Amino acid sequence: MTQKDILFLLAPGFEDNGRREYCPECAEIWGLLSYFPAILLSIEISYQPIGKPRTDMVKLLGDENQNCPTLLLVRSHVEGEMIGVKIAGPHCFIDNARDIGRYFSHLYGTPLPRGD
């Protein structure tokens, strides 16, 4: 069984600042996944709380890497130097929506984000 990349997202409609909110970058990733739903078969999604520490992420990436969205990569998927790939201990990850979109384009052949 192959290990899947893990996509850390904030759940839509979380409570913060005394109101319901959503993360614009996480929504951008959900939009991309709705355009190309086959990607969902290759990743696991882990919803994180709005508050920190985000324990699941800290265990893998350390205290300084708790941004959502973040895509934790299966090391075998990383070929050469890719834009936005960072390393924390033994793990490679991408911690913003546009670079995640570029990675999906590289791996799955989806279109690039506009402006690239």
Image (tube, rainbow, N blue to C red):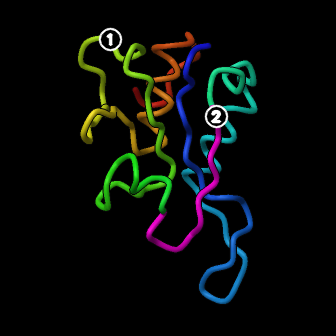
Q: Is residue 7 above or below residue 16?
A: above
From the image, tell me which residue sits under label 1.
79
Q: Which residues are magenta?
A: 44-54
Percent across and percent down for residue 15 are 68, 78
Q: Seen from this angle, which residue lies furthest front?
A: 1
Q: Is residue 89 left or right of residue 104?
A: left
Mark 2 → mark 1, Cα distance in angstroms: 21 Å
Look at 70% across and 84% down and name the residue there: 19
**Which of the two labelled residues, at mark 2 and mark 1, occupies the earlier sequence position?**
2
Percent across and percent down for residue 94 are 39, 37
Dot label at residue 44: 2
- The one nearer the camera, 69 or 32, is 69
Magenta segment includes 45: yes
SS label for mark 1: loop
Other residues around mark 1 within 10 Å, as few (<14) / some (14–19) / many (≥20): few
- Name the kind of residue labelled 1 in the image: Glu
Which quadrant is the C terminus positioned in? top left
Q: Seen from this angle, which residue lies furthest bottom?
A: 18
Of marks 2 and 1, the one in the foreground = 2
- The one nearer the camera, 86 or 57, is 57
SS label for mark 2: strand
Evaluate if marks 2 and 1 touch, with contact meaning CB atoms under 8 Å apart: no
**Quadrant in the picture for residue 87:** top left
- The one nearer the camera, 100 or 58, is 58
